[in-house]
Amino acid sequence: MELTGLGVFAFLDYLSIGEASAFAKRAEELGYDALWLTEGPYGRDALVQAGYLLSRTERIVIGTGVTSVWARGASAMASAAWTNAELSAGRFALGIGINTQAVAAMRGANYSRPIAFMSEYVRALKAFEYSAVGSAPAPPIVIGAQKPRMLELAGQATDGAITYFVTPVHTAEARRMLGPGKRLIVAQAVLMESDPSRARNCARNYMAYYLGIPGYAKFFAALGFNEHDLADGGSDRIVDAIVAWGDESAFRARLEEHRRAGADQVCVVALDPSGGMRPHLGALEALAPSSSGSTSGR
């Protein structure tokens, strides 16, 4: 599995399961190479949902972006991942992450020493031996990573990393930290709204949760932002850096920035101009790899 081209990153818990199935089929019809789905502490099990979507598609890679290591032991995670790989003839990718301290607490987990925990978890995943008849090749494993130590672990111990809520500057640094031969999957939010005021207001609503996460101030400082950029819902500068808003040409330009910075697969987070976290099909149709001028390399 190459984990290249153009993908989709979506919060499918905001769709009914029937809508999620139809969405996955439509993404496949549009020519996207992968669909990465998220997992929340009180929503659907990402591995079960991935298996369901794999059974209703034919070509597209389905990946977890990411499923929590606090939610299940490594053996249970590996068993589900290998099962999905088998039932789909190798179309499943396992993205795992430590989430935040608050999310870990919701799952009853102790967030102390997350790097050491992840390192041991990956070791156990890779030691897993799938014994079912008709087994498939091991699915690729990528770590949800933003900060240097987790990116370095992803490069040393797995097939690569998936990043979210980042800029092309971060993508270039992540590429360097991962090292050669490792896959870098980058999620980029886009918003089909050309009015600056409406676009930035919608983007700020989307960004509010992430800007409030403890520790993000240091992360954004490393990307060149300051306290002013993080105050009052985020400055125009940081909003424009995180969310590509406007039209198709603006979206394609941002996706290409990530690709030039070293991303192997760029995934579209299609924000709904009316608000909320339901994926916006209009933006995905505008950027479809099957259309002319796509950055997917098709």
Image (cartoon, rainbow, N blue to C red):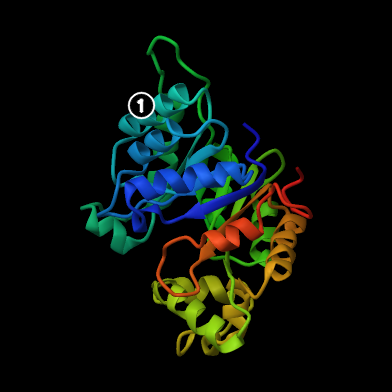
292 or 83, nearer to the observer: 292
Residue 81 higher or lower than 275, as above or below: above
x, y percent for residue 100:
36, 61
- Read off the residue under disc 1: 79
Amino acid type of the residue that numbered disc 1 sits on in the rendered structure: Ser
Q: Is residue 187 in view from this perspective?
A: no
Query: In the structure shown, which secondary structural element does the residue marked by tag 1 occupy?
Result: helix
The quarter of the image holding the N terminus is top right
x, y percent for residue 114:
39, 52
Q: Quadrant of residue 284?
A: bottom right
x, y percent for residue 218:
51, 74
Q: Is residue 264 left or right of residue 190?
A: right
Q: Is residue 180 left or right of residue 205?
A: right
Q: Residue furthest left?
A: 108
Q: Residue furthest top?
A: 133
Q: Is residue 145 left or right of residue 7?
A: left
Q: Residue at x 68, y 47 (%)?
A: 264
43 or 153, nearer to the observer: 43
Q: Quadrant of residue 82?
A: top left
x, y percent for residue 113:
37, 53
75 or 5, nearer to the observer: 5
Q: Residue at x 44, y 33 (%)?
A: 56
Residue 214 higher or lower than 76, as above or below: below
The quarter of the image holding the C terminus is top right
